[in-house]
Amino acid sequence: MSYKWLVAAVSLLLVTCSAASPNCAGSKNGDNTGFEEYLASRAGGMTDTFRFVVYGDTRGNLMHTVNADVISRINTYIVSLNPAPLFVIHTGDLARRGGADAYGSGKRAMKQLNDARIPYAVAVGNHELYASFPAWWRTNTSPQMQSEYQCSFCTSNTVGPICFPEEPKLPGYENLVFAFEFGNSFFAILDTYYVTKDVKYYDDISSEQLKWFRERVSGSNKKHRFVFAHKPVYSSGVHNEHPPATTHMLELMSVLNDNHVDIYFAGHEHYYVRRKIETADGHRWSNGVTHIVAGGGGAPLHKPNPAYGLSACAAKYSFTVMDVTANEIFGTTYGFSSLTDDITPIDKFCLSGAGKPCPGWEAQDRIVDKCGT
């Protein structure tokens, strides 16, 4: 056996054997403060008026685990915001592959946020679950890599990437899903890549997770509702609507619609898109659900297809700043095409609850950039 083959075999064995039970999750570094409690302490009593930021897909190309230069440019802007965001939610694919080294590269690239005391949470993507070795396995998610992610990826309850509390009704999903409330807002982070030794949900959501999410969102009395996952229910570019969404993803869409979720944030596609989906692939939803694909964090860019009826789109590195008040949600997305370009607004929108536009914003057409390159 050649040395290269031996290294690959030993690396795979270490990943398999060191994959601890998902029950290893919990608070780390002696941090016993809950995330919601931490946010409340940072907000200084202003729980109905706050700011958060969303972006994702910061992985590098074949030669780099992460795109550290783009991440640094985005995070430098984020930490300069006034008022500062309370937290950041990353829509997944922080790094190009899984494993301790790749996770470490991703966390080092995001260090600016931790230095500024801005915690960030990550919705697990497909790339976080790709095995490091052998090379041709990087397109396969595995339960061993998922266990490693669950047990070694997060930092603490208040320092990014934050650890998620265990969900008693959803065993086995530690550090993969999270629901919390803050002020007049409900938040949920979902997993669209859950894998066991018997079944793999790829670009999909499991029935038990869907049941848990339905109970959590329907049980909330908050006015504003935000949901995050790596996989869009419907895409508008490289991962388009053919084949159509799975049965479970269509059911997720119905849960989002029936519970008046304001925005479903996703990544996976490397661009920015905002689109209110009321009909797609022969299906209709009475309320409609605003989808924002915030995948412009540094991965090789894709070009969205405006033929899908998009409100806004841009093939640019980008991030979305969300300003929440008691009654309205304001969003501004900023973008740039290269490291030497200025960071400028590429989209602005306002929602007044249940995904409805604010008065005067009905057309949702305040677009600075329309599928620019």
Image (tube, helix red, strand yellow):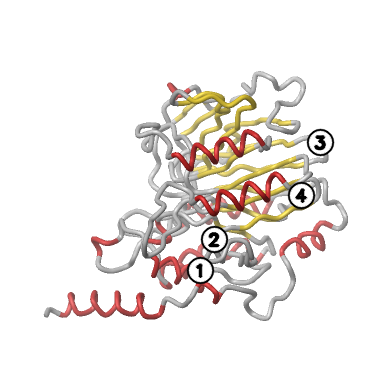
Q: CA distance from mark 3 to mark 1?
A: 36 Å
Among the 4 quarters of the image, the one containing residue 301: top left
Please rate how many residues cluster around mark 1, counting C-alpha atoms within 10 Å: few if below 14, some from 14 to 19, many from 20.
many
**Which residue is at 56% across, 50% downward?**
74
Q: Mark 1 or mark 3, which is nearer the start of the sequence?
A: 1
Q: Which label sits in the foreground, 3 or 4?
A: 3
Residue 150, disc: 1
Instruction: Please name whichever residue, 124 or 367, is drawn nearer the observer in this view of the structure.
Output: 124
Quadrant position of the N terminus in the picture: bottom left
Q: Mark 2 or mark 4, which is nearer the start of the sequence?
A: 4
Instruction: Please name whichever residue, 113 or 350, is drawn nearer the observer in this view of the structure.
Output: 350
For numbered disc 3, what is the local secondary structure? Answer: loop
Q: CA distance from mark 2 to mark 3?
A: 30 Å
Q: Which residue is mark 4?
A: 83
Residue 176, disc: 2
Residues under numbered marks 3 and 4 in contact, where contact means CB atoms less than 8 Å apart: no
Residues under numbered marks 2 and 1 in contact, where contact means CB atoms less than 8 Å apart: yes
Classify residue 344 as left or right of residue 61: right
For numbered disc 2, what is the local secondary structure? Answer: loop
